[in-house]
Structures are given as structure tokens and as C-alpha cells.
Image (cartoon, helix red, strand yellow):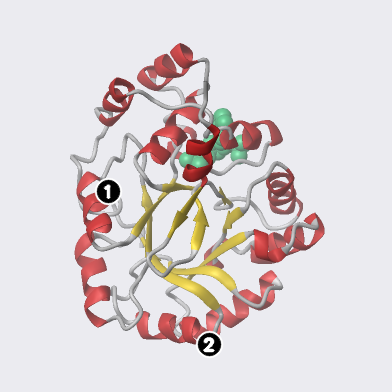
Amino acid sequence: MPDPIAGSQERTRVLADGSLIPTLGLGVWQVPDGPECEGAVRTALELGYRHIDTAQAYGNEASVGRALRESGVPREEVFITTKLNPRNRDPAAAAEQSLRALGVDQVDLYIVHWPGGGPTWAWPGMEEAHQRGYARSIGVSNFSVSELDQVIAIATVAPVLNQVQFSPFEYRRALLAACRERQVALEAYSPLGTGSHLSDPTVAGIAEALGRTPAQVLLRWCIQRETIVIPKSTHRERLAENAELFDFALSADELAALDALDRTGGTERARERSWW
Ligand code: A2P
């Protein structure tokens, strides 16, 4: 029997600054601005998603905002993340522009998209965005342990989250452990390997044994590894499938079999290669 109470405890997480974040979100990376993005966000909200992850660099903040308004779901019920494009050299001014595009007074989380130009220069501006109330929480993305430590060393307001490429195939144990020690939540992007991990035979075998789908197995692994996960889909049935994660659990043996798929050697890096 699924344990509904355990399931509900897994659905949200308390960040180090006391804010709550839903552990499942919709990521809209590579979703074109306009009807496609609006449709995905509207459908996700209809299906019960309460966390949307966008970015200045995705160019689809306006679509996210429109879908949110049209959904009728109260603003305060939805956790919205956007990311500083580090090519914008003024993080607070860039946040203000994001708020205008999204049509909201504040985002729930504002993170440095990648350590472009070095890991620390943006942080005072991120703190300013926080101080002005543009962002309730602030954090980083694609930061290694040493880059994270450089930010923490100069921070007045510490980053609460690091969003990185993470899945059983990119099982960055050293990064996960270091984030935990520093009270930084790890958020997993590309949890399905942008689709490429779905056909793996180990994943498929576990899915078949459990009567689940490969996507659910990969996402459930992220939940049981105590991360926050933001799969992307533009299809209603997949969005629904990806949200059914809290009524089953992977066994210790299944977790171990998935852990063994790691190709990163348990690195403390945030991804294999920088793209910037
Ligand atoms: P689509 O958007 O056409 O549904 P990731 O979250 O790792 O970036 O993976 C996203 C990719 O995986 C997208 O190509 C998405 O396609 C596909 N995808 C998302 N959910 C599922 C699912 N449940 N089953 C199959 N493919 C999926």
C-alpha cells in the first residue's frame, strides 16, 4: 500500500532560508516561446504541478507568466524560478526585467544560470535582487563545489540551491554530499538525460518489474536521492506520468542498480563539460 503521508512529506522541501519548494517542477528549457510553452505550463498547472522553472536565456518568461495568469491558479500557490543570464551584468536590473516579463511582483527563486565571468561577481547583485524583494530565495546553477565555496565565502545571504545536471547516469555523489554539508539543496536538471536515458535496459527492467515507466523510475530515483527534480515535457500524458512519483518507492537494490549507472565517477563538478 502506498503511504500517502510519506508521499506528502516528499512533495515539498524546506530550503535553508525557510522557504518551501515543491520537489517536482516543470522545466521549460528548449520549449519555444509562444503557444507551445504556454500550453505546457497551463497543462502542468491543470495537472497539479506547482513549480515552474524558466530562465532569462530561455526567452520564454512571458509565456510562463501568461499561462500562470490564464490558469486561474493563485500566484502564491506556484513556485517560480528564473535564472540570471550572466551576460546581463546587472543581476538586480535583470531580475526586474524578468518580473516584468513574467508579470509577477517577485519570483520564488532567482539563480545564477552558470558561473560565466567567474563564480562570484554576480553574487552582490543577486543579494541586491533579494534585498529589494525581487526574489524570495537566491541560488546558483552549474556550480562545482569549489565555485560554490567561493560564493559562500563572500556571501552575506548564502545560496540555498544549486541546480545541476543530475541523474543516475550523472550521479555526482561528491557534489550532492558537499551541497548537503553546506545546506544547499541540489536540483536536478535533465533528469531523463533529455530523453536519452529512457531506453536504458536497467531502467526499463526496473520499470517493468514495478509496473511503472522508465521516466517514473528515473524521476523517483531523484526524489529518493533527496533532490528537487524538473523534467521537461510538452505532452499532457507525459506531464501526468512524470507527476506520479509519490505513490511508490524504489527498493535499496533498485536504487543501487541505478546508482551503478553513473558515468561521472561521482564527481564534484556540476556537469562534464562547460558549454559557456
Ligand atoms: P517531450 O517534451 O516531447 O514530451 P529532460 O527532462 O531530461 O530534459 O528530458 C526531456 C525530454 O524527455 C524531452 O525530449 C521530452 O519530450 C522527453 N520526455 C519527458 N517526459 C517523458 C516521458 N514520460 N516519456 C517519454 N519521454 C519523455
187 displayed left or right of 110: left
Where residue 222 appears, as percent x and y from the top left, is 40, 39
Check disc 1 and report the residue beneath it.
272
Q: Looking at the picture, which amino acid does disc 1 mark?
A: Glu
Percent position (x, y) of residue 169? 32, 35
Name the residue located 21 percent from the left edge and 56 percent from the top edge: 178
- Tag count: 2
Please identify, in this view, whether the residue under mark 2 or under mark 1 is nearer the observer. Answer: 2
Q: Is residue 75 above or below residue 105?
A: above
Q: Local crowd at mark 2 within 10 Å, few (<14), some, or many (≥20)?
A: few
SS under mark 2: loop
Percent position of residue 227, x then y = 39, 47
Where residue 36 appears, x then y in whole percent? Answer: 72, 49
Q: Residue at x 26, y 34 (%)?
A: 262
- Write down the residue under mark 2: 132
Asked whether mark 1 and ligand 1 are closer than 8 Å, the reply comes as: no
Q: Residue at x 31, y 27 (%)?
A: 255
Going by the image, does 228 lie left or right of 105?
left
- The local secondary structure at tag 1 comes to loop
Rendering quarter of residue 256: top left
Furthest toward the top, the residue is 209
For residue 30, the mark is none
Image quadrant in which the C terminus is located: bottom left
Residue 220, placed above or below residue 82: above
Question: Looking at numbered disc 2 in the image, what kind of residue is underneath it?
Answer: Arg
- State the residue at coordinates (30%, 51%): 271
* Image position of 178 with respect to 128: above or below: above
Above or below, comparing residue 234 to residue 98 in the picture: above
Residue nearest the viewer, comparing 9 with 221: 9
- Ligand 1 location (quadrant): top right
Q: CA distance from mark 2 to mark 1?
A: 35 Å
